[in-house]
Amino acid sequence: MSGRILGISGPTVTVDLKGLKLYDMVRVGEAMLIGEVVRLEEDRAVVQVYEDTRGLGVGEQAKGVNVPLTVRLGPGLLSGMYDGLQRPLERLREETGPYISGGRELHALDLERPWRFFPLKQAGDEVAEGDILGHVEEGPFRHLISAMENGRIASIHPGEFTLAGPVGTYADGRVIQAHQEWPVRKPRPYRRKLSPQAPLVTGQRSIDFLFPFARGGTAILPGGFGTGKTILEQAIAKFADVDIVVYVGCGERGNEMAELLEEFVTLSDPWTGQALMTRTIVVANTSNMPVAAREASIYTAVTMAEYYRDMGFHVLLLADSLSRWAEALREISSSLEEMPGEEGYPTYLASRLASFMERAGVVETLSGSIGALSMILSVSPPGGDFTEPVTQACLRTAGAFLMLDTALAHRRHFPAINWFQSYSLYERDMVEHFSATVSPRWGEMQKRCRELLQREETLREVAEIVGIEGLQDADRLLMKAAERIRLEFLSQNAYTEDAFSAPDKTLAMIGDILEFYDRAEARLKAGEFLDDVLKG
Ligand SMILES: Nc1ncnc2c1ncn2[C@@H]1O[C@H](COP(=O)(O)OP(=O)(O)OP(=O)(O)O)[C@@H](O)[C@H]1O
Ligand SMILES: [Mg+2]
C-alpha cells in the first residue's frame, strides 16, 4: 500500500493512504522514516513520525505496512542498549555515525549469534499458545521459549541454532521460531493478576524501612530540578533485589546515559555477583534524539519487561523521567490540533498513564509460573510544583509516592525523600514480611523511628522560639537521636560503600541509634548531665 505525503506539521504527517488501521505502522519519505497512524479520515491518515521530520517534503512517498509498531522479543535482549524504537544503538552508531539518521531497519536481535536450544517438548506433542517449548541459556538466565500459536509439533531440534532459522515445525507446515514480534501498545497476556505480596528490596534505607516497595508494585519519584532523581533511579537499578532491570532514559541528558553504561559494565549485581549488564536492558531516548520516539520508548521498554516477566522472572522497569514522556505526548497532541486540557496536556494524559502503569503487577503466566513487573518512575514537576498534571495523574495510580524534597537536596541530604509527605500503600504488608524474615522488631522500630522524627519536628518549632538552650535535656537528647537518624540512617551517599544497604544492615543501624537513645535517656533519668551522656 503506497501513497504520498500531503502535509507535514512538526512530527505529524498527513498521507493519502486508505485502508489503514489506527496505530498501523507507516514508512514516510524517501528516508523511510518510521511512524504510526494516530488519526484516520475518509481518504487520508495522520501519521505520528518517530524520527526527525526535517528534510521531509510534501509529495514524497508513504508506505503502509499493515502492522502496528512492534518490538522483537527473543534471546539476546539482555545487556542490550536500544533507542525508543528498539534499534540497537551500538550497531546504529557503527552504521550511521553519532547522528542517527532516520529509517534504519536494524534488527533488535543478533541473527547470527549461535544459541543452544534445549527442547522440553517433542514431535507429536500438542501445544497451546504460551506453553513452554524449551529454553536457551542467556547468561545466567534460563530464557524460556514458548509457543506463539496452538498446534501439533512435527519436529523440534535440540542443539545449536541461530535466530535466523527455525527451531522446529508444526504438523501443518508452520515453522516454530525462538523469537517473535509483539505490538508495543498491547499488554502481553497472562492468566491472572495476583496482589503484591513480597517486598522489592531497593537497598535504600529510607525506602526499605519507611516506605517499603512491593514486587509488582508501582512507585513514583517526583522531584524538582537537581533533587537526585537520576542518581536514585540508577542506584536502584544497580542494587535492587530483582532478576532483570529495564532502564529507560526518557528525554534526559545523553551524557548521563553514557556514564551509566560506562559504570554498569564494571559493576556486579550485589545479590548474585554476576556482571550487572547481564541482567540489564537499557532503552535510551535522550534529549538529543527525536522527541516523538520518546512517546514510544516507554512502551518498547515495558513490552520487553513483560516478555521476561512471562518467563517467571521478577523484572523492574525504571523510567527517568515520565514528565519528558508526557511532554512528547503534549507536543504530538498539539500538532494534531486536539483540544488541550490542563497546561496544554491532552485530556487523555491521565488515562494513558494509568493504562501504562496497569502493565505492572504480579501475574500467573500463561505457562503457570509466577512473574512480576514492578515500576519505579521519576517525574520532574516544573518548579517543583507537585500540583501539576503529570504528578497528579501519576499519584492517582501509583502505589508508592516518594517525594523528593528540594530543601533536603539543598542541605545535601540524599536521597532527598521527604519522610513526612511520602507514603507507600504496600507498607503494612511489607512490614509484616520484614518482621517475619529479618526481625520481629522491624515494625516496632519503624514506628519509633517515625515518632522520633515527628517529635523532632515539633521541638524544632519550639526551639526556633526559645532557642535550643531553652529546651529541656530530655528534648535535646531526642533531637540528637533524630539528627542521627537523619544524617546516619536516612542519608545514603551514592558514591560510597554505603550506597547499598541490605535489610539486616538497615535494621542493625536503626537498632544502634535507638539503643543509644534508650541508654542515654536512662542515664539522664538517673541524674547524669546531658553533656556527659552525649560524650558516651
Ligand atoms: N544519593 C546521593 N548521594 C550523593 N549525592 C547525590 C545523591 N543524589 C544526588 N546527589 C547529588 O545531587 C546532584 C543532582 O542529582 P541528580 O542528577 O540525580 O538530580 P535530578 O533530580 O536527576 O536532576 P534533574 O532535574 O536535572 O534531572 C548529583 O550530581 C549529586 O551531586
Ligand atoms: Mg535527572
Image: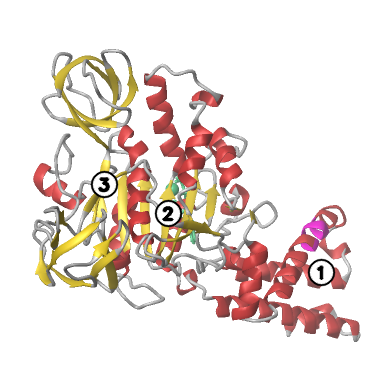
- Sort mark 3 into few (<14), some (14-19) or many (20+) by Cα contacts within 10 Å: many
Secondary structure mostly seen in magenta is helix
Marks 3/1: CA–CA distance? 60 Å
Q: Quadrant of the N terminus?
A: top left
| Residue at disc 3, secondary structure | strand
Splitting the image into 4 quarters, where does residue 469 fall?
Answer: bottom right
Range shown magenta: 455-460
Residue under the image location 34 percent in, 22 percent down: 39
Marks 3/2: CA–CA distance? 18 Å
Q: Amino acid at mark 1?
A: Arg
Q: In the figure, is residue 480 to the left or right of 174?
A: right
Relative to 226, is 414 above or below?
below
Instruction: Quickly name the residue at label 1.
Output: 476
Image coordinates of residue 232 in percent, x first then y, are 48, 58
Instruction: Quickly name the residue at label 3.
Output: 71
Say whether mark 2 is within 8 Å of ligand 2.
Answer: no
Marks 2/1: CA–CA distance? 41 Å
- Is residue 487 at least partly visible in the picture? no
Residue under the image location 53 percent in, 35 percent down: 350
Q: Single out the mark in the foreground, 3 or 1.
A: 3
